[in-house]
Amino acid sequence: MDEGFLSGTPLFKDMDRKDVQDMLACLGSYTKTYEKGAFIFREGERTQSMGMVLSGSVHIETEDFWGNRSIISDIGPGGLFGEAYACLKDEPLMVNVQAVSRTKVLFLEMGKVIRICPRSCPCHSRLIDHLLMIMARKNLLLSHRILHTMPKTIRERLLAYLSYLSVRQEGNWVTTPFNRQQMADYLNVDRSALSAEIGRMQKEGLIEVEKNRFRIRGSCPNVGPTSKNA
């Protein structure tokens, strides 16, 4: 186990190698490697452990009755998954977790994570604080996405998202971490339809576009409920 890598992750930050070693022994940890395409968790299953990606990456996906898949998020090295379900151990998963490439995962038993052992190690208290921060941030990101996909039209969704980025980045020029396909997935719209709408908005002078950078020009009408308070 690479304790040096773990000490640089959000969950184990500010811990030295000895602290990390002690925590791994205390938390019932184990590792498992998955080949590309393998399912780590499946919808309907229950889990008592959360996972941390050590190498490779995983997709959090939903699948409808007809087999259509939608990627909710991509988790890379150092990222956590399954923590909410592991806290609610009787709650069945509503998502699939699938390895995108050959992936190594560290599993931590949630019951041991959230309950401090009799030794009351200071590093265990810090780890719980870190986990709460991670879960709170994920909750905020999910709330943002819900707000950005509430508007009915593609234009309104895009402007709601760009308005949010404008506030966060404090300017009319904003940079999105997404390519077009990823942005379409995030906004839950068709990629071709999104590209066509971006083209129309450019012609109308509402936005300027340079790859993944956007400039919101002037006042944009009908941007939906999220942009008013962004």
Image (spheres, rainbow, N blue to C red):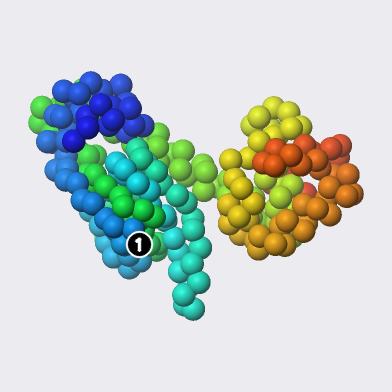
Q: Label 1: which residue?
A: 37
Looking at the image, residue 66 sits to the left or right of residue 126; the answer is: right
Judge whether 185 appears above or below 215 on screen: below
Tell me which corner region of the image, top left, top right, bottom left or bottom right, holds residue 61: bottom left
The location of residue 115, given as percent across then percent down, is 20, 38
Q: Nearer the viewer, residue 49 or 30?
A: 30
Q: Does residue 228 show up?
A: no
Q: Nearer the viewer, residue 84 or 51?
A: 51
Quarter of the image for the C terminus: give it: top right
- Residue at image position (16%, 45%) is 30
The residue sitting at the bottom extreme is: 66
Looking at the image, residue 105 sits to the left or right of residue 207; the answer is: left
Amino acid at circle 1: Gly
Looking at the image, residue 179 sits to the left or right of residue 29; the answer is: right
Q: Nearer the viewer, residue 223 or 69?
A: 69
The location of residue 69, given as percent across then percent down, is 49, 67
Tell me which corner region of the image, top left, top right, bottom left or bottom right, holds residue 52: top left
- Residue at image position (19%, 46%) is 31
- Residue at image position (66%, 36%) is 175
Judge whether 206 appears above or below 4 on screen: below
The location of residue 43, given as percent across then percent down, is 35, 66
